Amino acid sequence: MQDEWSKPVTVDEMYGGWDYETAVATLDRSLSPRPTESIFDEVGRLGVGPGDTVLDIGGRDGRHALLMAERFGCRAVSVDPVAENISSGRELVAGHECGHLVELRTGSIEQIPAEDGSFQLVFSRDMLGHIEDLALALNECRRVLTPGGFMVIFELFATALLHPEEQRSLCADTATVPERFSVSNFEAAVAASGLTVESLEILGSEYVEASQESGTAPNYLLQISRLRRAKESLLEELGEVPYRAMYGNALWSIYRMIGKLESRIYVLRRDDT
Ligand SMILES: C[S@@+](CC[C@H](N)C(=O)[O-])C[C@H]1O[C@@H](n2cnc3c(N)ncnc32)[C@H](O)[C@@H]1O
C-alpha cells in the first residue's frame, strides 16, 4: 500500500496537523456494504419465479435452495458430494415450510445428476475453487441448463497483492485449486465453454465487511491470533484438519478485507436459443 505514495510520512506529519479522533470517527462510518444475501437480488433480476427450477451446485445442506424457493416460489435442486451435508440438509428441508419445493441430490459438478436442459438457472456460490477441471464443470452446467438459461457464479479471485507463498498455503489449508484464483484462467474457461458473460460485478470486500458490521461473522483476526499463539494446544484439542481449515477460513476472510482476494459475481448465459 505504501508503495503508491511518492514519499514517506515524516514524524512531524505523523503526529501533527491532523486529528486522530476525527479520523477514527470517519472510519467508524459504515460505507453501507451490500450483505451476502444480495446475491439473490441478481437471481431475482434474471426473472426466476414459480414454474422455474434452479440448481444450486455445491449447495451444501440446501440452505440457499430453500431460500430461493421461499423468495421466488421456484423449485430448487441442491447437489453436493459430501454425505454429511446431504444428511443435515434432509433435516433442514423437512422442517422448512418450502421444503416441498426443494430436492437434495448427492453428486458433483463434474457429473451433475440431472437430465440435459433441466434448469432455468444454475447457482454456484463459493464452490468452484475446489474444482480441478473447470472446463468439464462448466460444460456440465451448460448441459443441464435450458437454452437461454443463466448461471450465477460467486467466486473469489486473487489480486496482485496476494503473494505466491500466501496463495500456496491458503489453498493447501482450504482444499482450493490454486489456478481457480486466476481471473484470466476462469474467463478463458468460460469463453471455451459455450457460455457467454452476461454481466460481471466486482464486489471486492463488500460482503465480508457487511458481515463484520452486522456481527454475523466471527472475529477472524482474533481467531488467527489465538490459533497462532496457542498452536500446539489447539492442534491437540481440535485436530490437524479442523485447525488448518479454521486457520484457512479466517485468513480467507482477512485477505478479502485487505484486498488480496476479491469477490466477483459473474452471470453467464447459455446462448444457443
Ligand atoms: C465453501 S462451501 C459453499 C457451500 C454453499 N454453496 C454456500 O455458499 O454456502 C463449498 C461447497 O462445495 C462443495 N463441493 C466440493 N467439491 C464439489 C464438487 N466437485 N461438486 C459439487 N460440489 C462440490 C462442498 O461439499 C461444499 O458444500
Image (cartoon, helix red, strand yellow):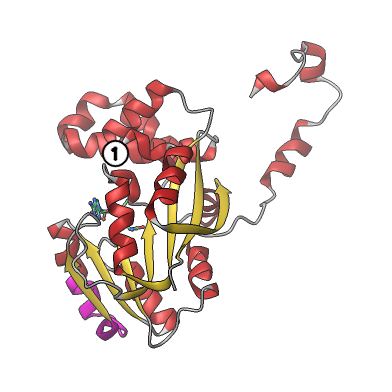
Asked if residue 178 is positioned above or below residue 189 in the image, the reply reads above
Q: Answer with left or right where residue 197 lies relative to residue 132.
A: right
Q: Position of residue 255 (x, y in %)?
A: 47, 35
For the stretch drawn in magenta, the main secondary structure is helix
Q: Amino acid at mark 1?
A: Thr
Q: Position of residue 97 (x, y in %)?
A: 31, 85
Residue occupying the point 32% across, 33% down? 171
Q: Position of residue 207 (x, y in %)?
A: 52, 53
Q: Residue furthest front?
A: 272
| SS at mark 1 in the image | loop
As rendered, which of 155 and 179 lies closer to the eye? 179
What range of the chain is rendered magenta?
Answer: 90-101
As rendered, which of 116 and 130 lies closer to the eye? 116
Asked if residue 197 is positioned above or below residue 89 in the image, the reply reads above
Does the magenta-highlighted stretch encompass residue 91?
A: yes
| Residue 222 appears in the figure | yes
Does the magenta-highlighted stretch encompass residue 192?
A: no
Q: Answer with left or right where residue 147 lies relative to residue 196.
A: left
Q: Position of residue 189 (x, y in %)?
A: 39, 46
Asked if residue 230 is positioned above or below residue 12 in the image, the reply reads below
| Residue 219 appears in the figure | no
Q: Split into 4 quadrants, where in the image is the C terminus?
A: bottom left
Ligand 1 image position (quadrant): bottom left
As rendered, which of 108 and 141 lies closer to the eye? 141
Residue identifier under label 1: 174
